[in-house]
């Protein structure tokens, strides 16, 4: 480990006096800085350990790379004497620099990112199930399990495991949201499970039951309350979790410690439960459906425009951190219409960033550091992790980022016109096809071809044009 290079990183972010707190993730150092204006970006870029840097959600992040970031962080702690901080402490320190909109976006990110591994795992398992049950993949007009019937139960079990995260999605969100809002996450799980209890009418059968006039109800103090579950819904459990957490905090401040175990949780859960079914659930359910209908309506009415805008804007949204808000929309779409047409464009956008970075390896042959960074960051992006490619290469030179956006926008139009959907969120790179409905594989592979070729070619041409102008 080059101690001097680590010291230069500390100096470049304004010195140890400018560091309020610091931690790291899989690939990046994360700083909560007192004054980001003191950062010397040029000095950071010259550092051999640094693959890129950016500011997002009130944190200044320095891309180092998987594995190496641990060593760099430990050396930095030894040099500066700063205490080892948790990611939550960094987030709390960074939050002081955010405006209300940024705080709202950060709150959504903090809720949904912890449950993402379960959702991505479900997506990959659904991909395996798609291969086993999809027709015309291996045999004309038949699925693999139709020919090899002994695999049918195997596919059924995989499907059950994959669907669990979505059937009990409110429980996952309840756990994460109540934890974020300062309450007991176990009560959040109970709240989420309560909203999908088997005694309630399944939300996916609500429309049919409504047409038949067979919706069961509770008669409560003269009110007729529909006994409807909220499977696949995002907003009801989000708002109910906020109420539950704040009520728990309120009660803990006013009830003596000796009585809290017997009173706080029962009262908070009971009151939140009643509010959920009487007020929160019906209102947010309607709002959620309006959002879904609005998004679907736009893409149905003008699919070219929808694909163009989302395909082009997703990468810029990553810079601001606003892309996390669309995870909630994806989950809402999956729960309401059975699939999302937004996430496939996210996967293609990631691949496009990798292709643009990969082109820089050939366009800038004389820059050995850039060549190595371009290759490793491209592979990372093709496997779904875009930060090294986006912040280490593409945004630094600008034109690769524009080339990636153009490729992503074209591919977005193509797959949106054909209505490509995914039943779940998976790995947002080359393995993404596993999480796409099998009937759309052909079109999605065409989209993948576009984001592999177009950003590469455009980046290469732009680099050569720039060189000729400079010469």
Image (cartoon, rainbow, N blue to C red):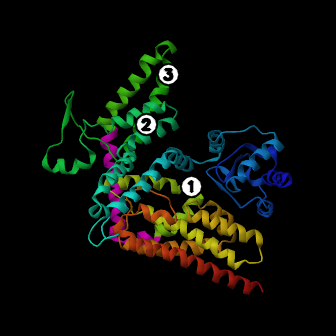
Q: Is residue 346 visible?
A: no
Label 1: how many Cα within 10 Å (few below 14, some 14–19, many 20+)? some
Mark 2 → mark 3, Cα distance in angstroms: 16 Å
Q: Which of disc 1 and disc 2 is earlier in sequence?
A: 2
Residue 356, percent from left and from top = 61, 73
Whether residues under marks 1 and 3 lie with C-beta atoms below 8 angstroms apart, the answer is no
**Left or right: 353 with respect to 467?**
left
Q: Given the current orientation, which residue lies at the most extreme left position?
A: 212
Label 2: how many Cα within 10 Å (few below 14, some 14–19, many 20+)? many
Residue 357, percent from left and from top = 64, 71
**Quarter of the image holding residue 219?**
top left
Q: Residue at x 49, y 18 (%)?
A: 254
Residue at image mark 2: 241
Q: Is residue 417 above or below residue 31?
A: below
Quadrant location of the C terminus?
bottom right
Residue at image mark 3: 252
**Left or right: 107 with respect to 142?**
right
Q: Given the current orientation, which residue lies at the most extreme top position?
A: 258
Mark 1 → mark 3, Cα distance in angstroms: 34 Å
Q: Is residue 101 visible?
A: yes
Q: Specify the segment rendered in magenta.
A: 280-308
């Amino acid at each position: 480990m080059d101690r001097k290079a680590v010291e230069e990183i500390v100096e470049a972010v304004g010195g140890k006096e400018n560091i309020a707190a610091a931690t790291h993730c899989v690939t990046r150092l994360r700083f909560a800085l007192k004054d980001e204006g003191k950062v010397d970006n040029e000095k950071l870029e010259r550092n051999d350990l640094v693959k890129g840097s950016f500011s997002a959600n009130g944190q200044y992040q320095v891309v180092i790379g998987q594995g190496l970031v641990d060593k760099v962080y430990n050396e930095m702690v030894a040099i500066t004497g700063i205490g080892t901080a948790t990611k939550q402490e960094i987030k709390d320190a960074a939050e002081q620099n955010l405006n209300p909109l940024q705080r709202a976006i950060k709150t959504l990110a903090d809720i949904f990112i912890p449950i993402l591994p379960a959702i991505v795992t479900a997506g990959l398992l659904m991909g395996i199930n798609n291969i086993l049950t999809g027709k015309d993949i291996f045999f004309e007009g038949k699925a693999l399990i139709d020919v090899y019937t002994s695999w049918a139960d195997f596919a059924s079990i995989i499907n059950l495991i994959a669907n669990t995260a979505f059937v009990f999605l409110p429980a996952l969100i309840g756990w994460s949201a109540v934890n974020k809002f300062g309450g007991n996450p176990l009560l959040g799980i109970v709240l989420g499970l309560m909203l999908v209890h088997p005694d309630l009418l399944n939300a996916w059968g609500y429309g049919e039951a409504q047409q038949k006039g067979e919706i069961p109800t509770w008669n409560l103090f003269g009110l007729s309350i529909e006994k409807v579950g909220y499977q696949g819904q995002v907003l009801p459990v989000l708002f109910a979790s906020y109420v539950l957490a704040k009520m728990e905090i309120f009660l803990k401040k006013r009830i003596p410690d000796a009585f809290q175990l017997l009173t706080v949780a029962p009262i908070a859960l009971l009151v939140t439960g009643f509010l959920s079914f009487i007020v929160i659930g019906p209102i947010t359910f309607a709002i959620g459906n309006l959002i879904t209908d609005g998004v679907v309506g736009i893409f149905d009415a003008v699919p070219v425009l929808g694909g163009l805008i989302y395909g082009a804007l997703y990468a810029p949204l990553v810079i601001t951190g606003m892309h996390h808000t669309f995870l909630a929309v994806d989950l809402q779409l999956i729960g309401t219409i059975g699939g999302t047409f937004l996430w496939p464009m996210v996967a293609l956008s990631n691949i496009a960033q990798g292709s643009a970075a990969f082109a820089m390896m050939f366009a800038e042959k004389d820059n050995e550091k850039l060549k190595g960074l371009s290759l490793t960051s491209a592979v990372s992006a093709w496997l779904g992790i875009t930060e090294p490619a986006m912040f280490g290469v593409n945004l630094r030179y600008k034109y690769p980022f524009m080339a990636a956006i153009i490729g992503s926008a074209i591919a977005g139009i193509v797959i949106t016109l054909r209505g490509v959907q995914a039943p779940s969120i998976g790995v947002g790179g080359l393995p993404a096809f596993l999480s796409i409905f099998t009937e759309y594989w052909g079109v999605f592979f065409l989209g993948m071809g576009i984001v592999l070729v177009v950003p590469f070619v455009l980046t290469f041409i732009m680099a050569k044009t720039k060189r000729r102008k400079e010469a």
